Amino acid sequence: MEKLHQKVESDIKAITHEWMSSGFLNEGDLFVVGCSTSEVIGEHIGTAGSEEVAAIIYEKLAMLKSQTNIRLAFQCCEHLNRALVVERETMNKHQLEEVAVIPAPTAGGSMASYAYKQMKAPVVVEKIQATAGIDIGETMIGMHLKRVAVPLRFAQRQIGNARLTAARTRPKLIGGERAIYK
């Protein structure tokens, strides 16, 4: 298990470095994280969650947050309708609506449960419109991204044994052939 933990740490460190050098993250951006720790350790989603693995991932994402000033949102599993754990400050700033639940490893998932325990003033909200995010283990974060999601092809494609998908969003292009875009 120690070898797997080292791999997870190396993998998450690599993807956070790619995000930092991408230029896609701006201060205050909402960044959604979907993560199946079961998939990371090589098991079927929802069957073998690990707060130890969640701790490794959370630590590196907290570093990404501190270096880019983004706002993290950790998606719960489908048992909590993919609600999200955020800081109360984030909820207030983005005028999000709080829901009454505390994630647990068996209802919400190990990653969301661990994040809830680490935050200063955690709350759970039903939905967000994030600017970017990562999906570790095919947890389906798309419902929490703004409307025009752009998949990113980073070099780091896995965290442990789980597939990794990353996305950013862009404004809609409107106006037709005479319109001018950046």
Image (cartoon, helix red, strand yellow):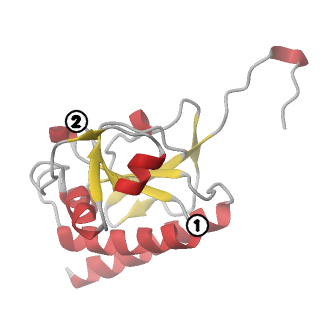
* Near-viewer residue (132 or 44): 132
Residue drawn at x 84%, y 32% as measured from the top left:
181
Q: Which mark is residue 81?
A: 2
Q: Gap between marks 1 and 2, in whole Å? A: 29 Å
Pointer 1 and pointer 2: residues touching (CB < 8 Å)? Answer: no
Dividing the picture into quadrants, the one containing residue 177 is top right
- Which quadrant does the C terminus fall into? top right
Residue 55 is left or right of residue 16, and the answer is left
* Residue 139 drawn at (x, y percent): 31, 45
* Residue 120 drawn at (x, y percent): 31, 68
Q: Mark 1 points at which residue?
A: 68
Dividing the picture into quadrants, the one containing residue 35 is bottom left
Q: Looking at the image, is 16 positioned above or below residue 4? A: above
Three-letter code for the amino acid on which mark 1 is drawn: Thr
* Near-viewer residue (39 or 166): 166
Q: Residues within 10 Å of mark 1 (few under 14, many from 20)?
A: some
